[in-house]
Amino acid sequence: MPWFMEQIRRGFFEVVNPFNRRVSLVPATPEEVHSIVFWSKNFGTFIEDEYGDQLRRRGYHLFFNFTINSVDAVLEPNVPPLKDRLDQLGYLCDRFGSRAINWRFDPICNFITGQGPSNDNLQDFNTIAQKAAELEIERCITSFMDPYPKIRKRLSSRPGFMFIDPPLRDKIQTIVAMEKWLCALNMQLMLCCEKKVIGALPPDCGVTPSSCVPNDLLVELFGGKISVKRDTGQRVKAGCGCKVSIDIGSYRLQPCHHNCLFCYANPASHVGGK
């Protein structure tokens, strides 16, 4: 966040293309930025140092994708306790409005350890959903873990642990159960890049594709004008519904220290930190 705020003060971001290393300048003034979409599973520093209030005073509109998964020290070793994360969610809802927040339970992980039976990380889903509903969160976004090469390499240091990709019928059963629970709480379940699963769901299932960068909703929330075209740089063929945006973060320059076992993006594991 200190790096982010310094770029805001400068009025632009220098963004390095991860594929060709070219640097481009992205304007960052309130006049040229409709909304800022933050993604995290730990908004502690953001809240403690009141960065959101600083940004709003400068004239920026803020939207949040907050990933809150079940407690699992193997899958997510460095995230705060669940109670702290739910408290953070409550703060963001109170300060910025529940409609400006997507709750992401992402990804759903199925795995085995040793010779034991298969497990998943859904044990706290109902608890988190209940709290999110009390805070009037309207949307839950989820997906199933994809076994990227980075993840397989990371697992080489964990003998006996293995992620498994459930058959489609099991995925459908999981999603239908989640949707039923959320429907009772007046919350919409959305799937991120799960085109095949959505196509196989029962006709009466209310699950829809997600748009984690929902420009149409941003206009509804904050007014103004913004493109609602699909972001062709994302996984459109897989079902990504995100609208056009510019990503200004870098896992190499601002590395994440959560060390999540299933992370598809972080280039390496890091010791300590938040």
Image: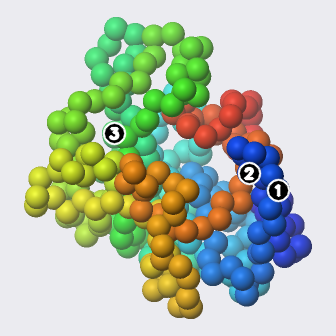
Tag 2: Cα neighbours inside 10 Å, few (<14), some, or many (≥20)? few
Q: Residue at x 59, y 54 (%)?
A: 40
Q: Earlier in the sequence, mark 3 or mark 2?
A: 2
Q: Which residue is mark 1?
A: 23
Give percent across and percent down for residue 55. 73, 77
Q: Is residue 39 above or below residue 146?
A: below
**Tag 1 near tag 2, CB within 8 Å:** yes
Q: Secondary structure at mark 2?
A: loop
Mark 1 vs mark 2, CA separation in Å: 6 Å
Mark 3: give few (<14), some (14-19) or many (20+) Cα within 10 Å.
few
Q: Is residue 242 left or right of residue 260?
A: left
> What residue sits right under mark 2 in the picture?
17
Task: Work out whether residue 82 or residue 146 is closer to the camera in this orientation and state it.
Answer: 146
- Kind of element beneath mark 3: loop
Q: Residue at x 42, y 37 (%)?
A: 145
- Residue type for callout 1: Val
Q: Which badge, 1 or 3, is on the more N-terminal residue?
A: 1
In the rendered structure, which amino acid carries the disc numbered 2?
Asn
